[in-house]
Amino acid sequence: MPTELRRPERTFTIRQLCTEFKATPRALRFYEDKGLLTPARDGMNRVYSYKDRARLILILRGKRVGLSLQEIREILELYGEHDEAMTQNAHSLKKFREKIVDLEQQREDIDGAISELRAACERLEKHLAAKRPDLLPKAADYDQMLRARLDGHAESLGAK
Amino acid sequence: MPTELRRPERTFTIRQLCTEFKATPRALRFYEDKGLLTPARDGMNRVYSYKDRARLILILRGKRVGLSLQEIREILELYGEHDEAMTQNAHSLKKFREKIVDLEQQREDIDGAISELRAACERLEKHLAAKRPDLLPKAADYDQMLRARLDGHAESLGAK
DNA sequence: TATGCCCCTTACGTAAACGTCAACAATCGC
DNA sequence: GCGATTGTTGACGTTTACGTAAGGGGCATA
């Protein structure tokens, strides 16, 4: 991991973050609209700090696990100002607890879904092997797939 | 678990399934519209078989793990007719494989999100304990929460 | 017979999370 | 100095997964 990315004083343009995380400018601006991001400005242009980038990572992961932007915002707000809205926070605490239980359930669901899909794959494979072995994916294809995944990550490191 | 529910010849009304799984009639009809369910009819009325119920369970779990209805349909279709569209199925196989990788990633995301939330909860709790201990949730609340969860499940067993 | 409850279809409305397009400014390489 | 690229702000469009209301049938109970 390049230390350059970590240097706290480093900043990012909207496009840099977009290509790194496969988002769109529209999306980042939308998150800003909704109060999840508040990048600095250089004239008109948005300037994302290292912290903004960290928040973005949390936002995207939150989305992947099915949190709404609203919920994500509540979580992010914890990492900001304190003290003022304490009663609010008591409420947040409760909601977070519930969300944790929720996610634990979701984990089980995912495990279930994964084995379901694995079973389905096996069925399909057997079926194909019997009737149309020519359609079976080759080892090369799997190789290809892996490479694509790795490229995806490498890309985020920036070739330059 | 009541064996009554399992008897293959048992059928369900739309409302029975809805209350069992906390769905709405509108949702079930919507799934039907989209080809995910095809209950029999008694005159105008839908009659759900035990198999339909099983499909519904898969649908709902699929949703919880973030699959679109479209994706869920593809999975469900595997459990139906075979042979005809083999090339189609070769494609499905590939997509399923990808989905599995996806879900495994999602599992990691969830684990990450859970520890994130746990950390946030701890922070909040400490903060509250220091400044407004009166707002801290009591043991009784937790008890209450558990009971609610259990009730939720008991309900699905049907009290008569 | 009226009231209620459940069922149906059709159709329009909605919230979330952007996509897309228009119109314009700043900057870079040539 | 000019086109290409990247940035900006609106404003309207789109998709998904339903919600909600309108209008009507069927059966039971008071």
Image (tube, coloured by chain):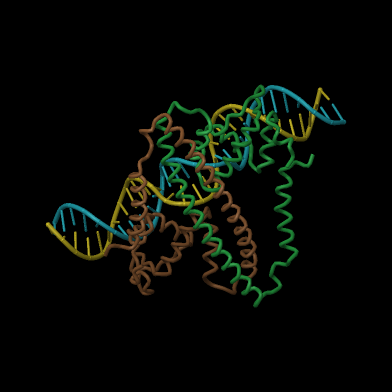
Chain colours: A green, B brown, C cyan, D yellow
- Image quadrant holding the C terminus of chain B, namely bottom left
Which residue corresponds to the image point at 62% horizontal and 32% vertical from the top-left? A51
Compared across the picture, whether A24 is left or right of C5 comes to: right
Camera-nearest residue between A154 and B77: A154
Camera-nearest residue between B152 and B14: B152
Residue that sits furthest to the bottom in the current view? A130
Residue that sits furthest to the front in the current view? B130
The total of numbered circles placed on residues is: 0
Quadrant of the rendered image containing residue B26: bottom left
- Image quadrant holding the N terminus of chain B, namely bottom left
Residue B65 image position (x, y, % from top left): 51, 54
Say above or below: C27 vs A5: above
Which residue corresponds to the image point at 45% horizontal and 49% vertical from the top-left? A101
Residue B120 image position (x, y, % from top left): 50, 39
Residue B125 image position (x, y, % from top left): 44, 37
Which residue corresponds to the image point at 36% horizontal and 58% vertical from the top-left? B153
Camera-nearest residue between B56 and B123: B123
Camera-nearest residue between B54 and B130: B130
Residue A36 image position (x, y, % from top left): 54, 34
Say above or below: A10 vs D27: above
Compared across the picture, whether A28 is left or right of A70 comes to: right
Quadrant of the rendered image containing residue B53: bottom left
